[in-house]
Amino acid sequence: MSIISEYQLTHCSMKLLAYLFYYRGMTALQLSQMYYESEEPFPTQKSSVHNYLSKLKKQNLVTSKKLEGNIRPGSIYYLTTKGFEVVKEMLNIDAGATENGFILLNERNGIPTQSDLPYSLYQPPKQQISHHLLLIDFFIRLRIHFSEEESVDHRLSMYCSTPYTYNNMDSKIRPDAEIILPNGDAYWIEVDRATESHSQLMAKFQNYKNFLSYLKKNNLPIPFKGIVFLTDEKQQTYGMKRRWMNILSAYLKSLYPYQNEVRLILTPLNRVEEILRFEMKRMELNEAAKQRLHEKLHQRGYHRILPFIRKSDQSLFYAIAMNKKSYKIFFVHVGNAYDSSLYTNFHQFIQRLMKIHQRDEVKQLQPEGFEQIVFHPDRDPYIIPALQGDHALKDIEEELGMLNQNITFIQLDTEDV
């Protein structure tokens, strides 16, 4: 039992208060899942958390709001103004502190990362409760499905929101969250409830483009490697392909010429671990893909295979397979099932194809055309047939038809590397 600001608090109470501070607001079930590190806590565990929440409400440190409509059962719990100040004291947050907001760095390593922000920023977004709770479900998976060696640190929107000025216009880039992988690669998270129209998605990506242009103009580095669109599990069953076509089309049309610098990934909640582990193991998976590529092409009768690596990210790009009289070019891609880099890399490949045919290694051989081999973590990637809506990207439209022809999908298991 600890006494903070004259309040007697148990270890469990302090943990629940800290979670509500870090994550702005959660349901009792989510708090139980996080505290007991289980997606399905026992009834006794859920009851225990309810009891602690009731005591914290009586102490006026926590309040709640009943969830209405079809959001989900129960209430959302969040700190009162008094509870907010108590937690600041409990976490030793200095007055006026401005830190980076990464939660696990603060919680597990004891490094101060939380800022002295106003209470209004920490209240849950009452107009977007479903959106917020899906993001919390995502954070829970990050906390309970990754070991300390592969931990994925994360922070909320108020810490990764960035104002900028471009073309004399003041704007702000504000992803829903940011994650950072063990290798230091950062990804910005956008929760997608499939409610944004195509024009709204275009506007979102236009804002990203303006921000990237601002960074380039000021010689500033891009602070994130990609954008992960997070959907709920139902989207995987109903409308995933249609939604991917909508989002990817808006991305390709709006973000030019930065598509090769910032990747787009779409994932349902229940595939988060698989997708992120794939990102963590990209170098190893590229090596595994190179070996599988050699095996497959040798089986097809090619006696010499030359793989070529993309300098920018050290990933497989294409390969030339030769026999005594002829050669064939293979576009090779290693990526997630819903991953924009498949399209942007193929675009680069088509632009380079003429130069590949002119390489010294193939000058005395007859060309046999080209094929595509795509290595991926789960089900076969869905190749969109066309871009949605009006656009001027006729070359991309033509390439989509080429990409769909003569394509082979090969699954890579992240557990095998």
Image (tube, rainbow, N blue to C red):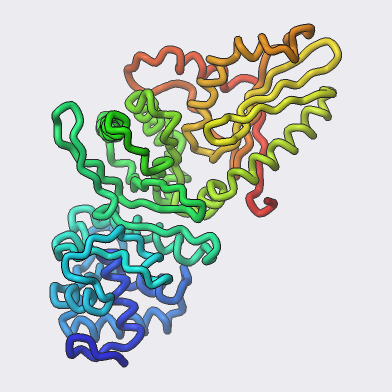
Q: Quadrant of residue 1?
A: bottom left
Residue 123 visible somewhere in the drawing: no
Total labels: the figure holds 0
Closer-to-camera residue (383/101) = 101
Q: Classify residue 16 by image quadrant.
A: bottom left
Query: 231 or 174, which lies in front?
Result: 174
Q: Is residue 266 above or below residue 217?
A: below
Asked if residue 263 can be seen in this view, the reply is: yes
Quadrant of residue 138 within the rendered picture: bottom left
User: Is residue 214 left or right of 408 when viewed as pictured?
Assistant: left
Instruction: Point out residue 75 in the picture as x, y percentages from the top left corner.
Output: 25, 69
- Residue sitting nearer the eye, 12 or 151: 151
Please say if 56 is above or below 257: below
Rendered view: 155 above or below 389: below
- Residue 261 placed where, x, y %? 43, 32
Q: Residue at x 83, y 29 (%)?
A: 299
Please give left or right for residue 198 compared with residue 126 in the image.
right
x, y percent for residue 51: 30, 85
Residue depicted at 40% across the width and 65% down the height: 104
Task: Residue 410: give x, y in percent of width and height.
Answer: 67, 37
Please tell me which residue is depicted at 27% across the width and 35% down the height of the picture: 211
